[in-house]
């Protein structure tokens, strides 16, 4: 007998899920051991042309009625956002359905509730598509690395911002036109503020931290977040001058003593020889550093309808197989309870470019401010002369709070006309 799938949402991702379910029905049936059949599709606007070729009778605006129908076995949620997605997923779980979702915003805000409900009901909640699109990353972290100790997860997890930064770097394109292009290609969230202000990457970072460090309490609100809206053409040029490229990174890291974790999303300058520096367009790439496995790198399409639908289908096959075997993965039962430490305690490195008056004693005064905050300078160079003089400094690793205070104090020095660029720097080696 066929297993019936309820699809919630039929937009960029949902319509590709429909296409792949139709095109691959025979292979999927043989891989699972039984066919999958679309039992219904919930959308917001019934009249919209979707080109799925499906019977219009399958479409409904009654999503709650659909997920609680007795003949539905599996639910795929690709609506996005917190509500009604949360209520629909919880209702599906309560009525014994396994769920596949791409919804990082919801999982980052309330994943603990959803996993607890799934454990109680003995059903699966799979969400590979929620982080890094097509890249198999979450199941390797959850399953393959379950016997190891992960120290750091660091990567590019938002396709839209990587696309924009890449266009700004390689073509000198503007921010707004690059964002419009990313939207047209189906990479951006329904509200692209989630992408450019770093909310989407922060949600993904929270999910990665939870899986990597087995700590259920990390939510998007715990993640230090800075987006790319403040990145200027000057920052890009400054990075270029240093042989670097600007990327928005998500970094989840155990503290040196292993008693807490840091979770952050912000732009960084990366040396061009760094493997993440070569990740262009909407591609994503994530480094995982584990005690015994060493360094692993995951790379692939991070956004877009078809790549994301591929991850959804992989999960659908997995949960369908589990259902046939009357088993489910109980996720989140074990909790290390590791707390998230404040950004100020995180060890980072800064690049600072200052427009300064070109007069004797400037460098000494600037160096004094760094020293006063216990921050040592790795290198310094002067560009230009007279009114155009710019002092460019890169610090050694130091607590982020000390670096931030250093910049605040530099801003008010009378010989500093303006702070032209401030950005964290990630080294090619281990000292980042
Ligand atoms: N796009 C991408 O590259 C990726 C997206 N994701 C995630 O996948 C999910 C879907 O994204 P995407 O497909 O791009 O989003 P879209 O905005 O393209 O599609 C959303 C779909 O949900 C439907 N919908 C919205 N509100 C309701 C509601 N209240 N009841 C029923 N249906 C509703 C919409 O209906 P209608 O068509 O009638 O408006 C639409 O079909 C999100 O969680 C997103 O974060 C994850 C990875 C990559
Ligand atoms: N808007 C997201 C879509 C995938 O998660 C992105 O750009 O990465």
Image (cartoon, rainbow, N blue to C red):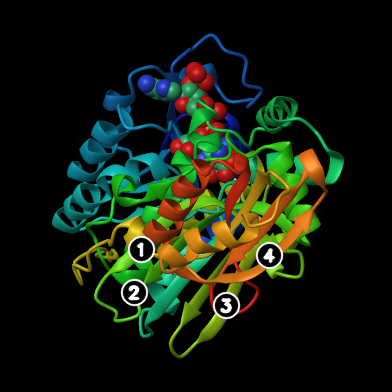
Q: Position of residue 310 (x, y in %)?
A: 59, 51
Between the C-alphas of marks 3 and 1, the distance is 20 Å
Residue 344 in view here: yes
Pair 4/1: label in front: 4
Dot 1: within a 10 Å radius of its alpha carbon, few (fewer than 14), some, or many (20 or more) residues? many
Tag 2–tag 1 contact (CB < 8 Å): yes
Q: Which residue is mark 3?
A: 296
First in sequence: mark 4 vs mark 2: 2
Q: Earlier in the sequence, mark 4 or mark 3?
A: 3
Task: Indicate the position of residue 331 as horizontal and vertical percent values.
Answer: 27, 63
- First along the sequence among labels 2 and 1: 2
Name the residue rendered at 34%, 46% in the picture: 220
**Helix, strand or loop at disc 2?**
loop
Please name the residue that numbered disc 1 is placed on.
Answer: 262
Position of residue 63 in the picture relative to residue 412 (left or right): left
Q: Which mark is residue 255?
A: 2
Residue 189 marker:
none
Q: Hey, which quadrant is residue 176 in on the image?
A: top right
Q: Nearer the viewer, mark 2 or mark 3?
A: 2
Foreground disc of the pair 4, 2 = 4
Can you say whether 235 is above or below 275 in the image?
A: above
Q: Is residue 30 above or below residue 170?
A: below
Q: Which residue is tagged 4?
A: 380
Q: Position of residue 244 (x, y in %)?
A: 74, 60
Disc 2 to disc 3: CB gap under 8 Å: no
Real-space Cα separation, disc 4 to disc 3, in angstroms: 33 Å
Alpha carbons under labels 2 and 3: distance apart? 20 Å
Residue depicted at x 76% and y 57%: 382
């Amino acid at each position: 007998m066929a297993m019936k799938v309820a699809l919630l949402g039929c937009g960029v991702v949902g319509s590709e899920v429909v296409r792949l379910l139709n095109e691959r029905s025979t292979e999927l049936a043989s891989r699972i051991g039984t066919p999958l059949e679309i039992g219904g599709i919930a959308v917001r606007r019934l009249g919209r042309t979707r080109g799925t070729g499906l019977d219009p009778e399958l479409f409904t605006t009654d999503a709650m009625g659909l997920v609680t129908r007795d003949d539905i076995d599996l639910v795929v949620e690709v609506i996005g956002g917190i509500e009604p997605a949360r209520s629909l997923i919880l209702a599906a779980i309560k009525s014994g359905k396994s769920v596949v979702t791409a919804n990082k915003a919801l999982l980052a805000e309330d994943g603990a509730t959803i996993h607890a409900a799934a454990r109680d009901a003995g059903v699966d909640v799979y969400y590979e598509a929620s982080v890094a699109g097509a890249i198999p990353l979450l199941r390797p972290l959850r399953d393959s690395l379950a016997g190891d100790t992960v120290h750091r997860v660091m990567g590019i997890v938002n396709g839209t911002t990587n696309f924009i930064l890449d266009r700004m770097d390689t073509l000198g394109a503007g921010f707004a036109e690059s964002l419009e292009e990313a939207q047209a290609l189906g990479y951006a969230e329904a509200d692209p503020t989630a992408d450019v202000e770093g909310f989407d990457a922060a949600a993904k970072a929270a999910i990665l931290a939870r899986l990597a460090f087995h700590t259920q309490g990390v939510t998007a609100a715990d993640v230090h977040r800075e987006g790319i809206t403040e990145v200027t053409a000057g920052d890009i040029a400054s990075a270029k001058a240093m042989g670097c490229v600007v990327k928005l990174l998500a970094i989840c890291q155990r503290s040196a003593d292993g008693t807490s974790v840091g979770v952050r999303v912000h732009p960084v300058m990366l040396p061009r020889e760094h493997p993440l520096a070569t990740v262009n367009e909407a591609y994503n790439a994530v480094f995982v550093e584990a005690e015994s496995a060493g360094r692993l790198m995951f790379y692939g399409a991070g956004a877009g309808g078809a790549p994301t639908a591929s991850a959804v289908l992989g999960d659908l096959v997995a949960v369908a197989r589990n259902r046939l075997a009357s088993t489910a993965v109980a996720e989140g039962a074990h909790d290390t309870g590791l707390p998230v430490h404040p950004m100020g305690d995180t060890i980072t490195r800064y690049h600072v470019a200052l427009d300064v008056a070109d007069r004797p004693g400037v460098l000494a005064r600037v160096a004094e401010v760094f020293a006063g905050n216990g921050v040592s300078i790795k290198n310094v160079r002067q560009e230009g002369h007279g009114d155009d003089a710019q002092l460019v400094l890169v610090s050694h690793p130091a607590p982020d709070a000390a670096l931030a205070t250093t910049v605040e104090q530099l801003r008010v020095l009378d010989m500093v006309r303006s702070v032209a660029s401030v950005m964290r720097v990630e080294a090619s080696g281990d000292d980042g």
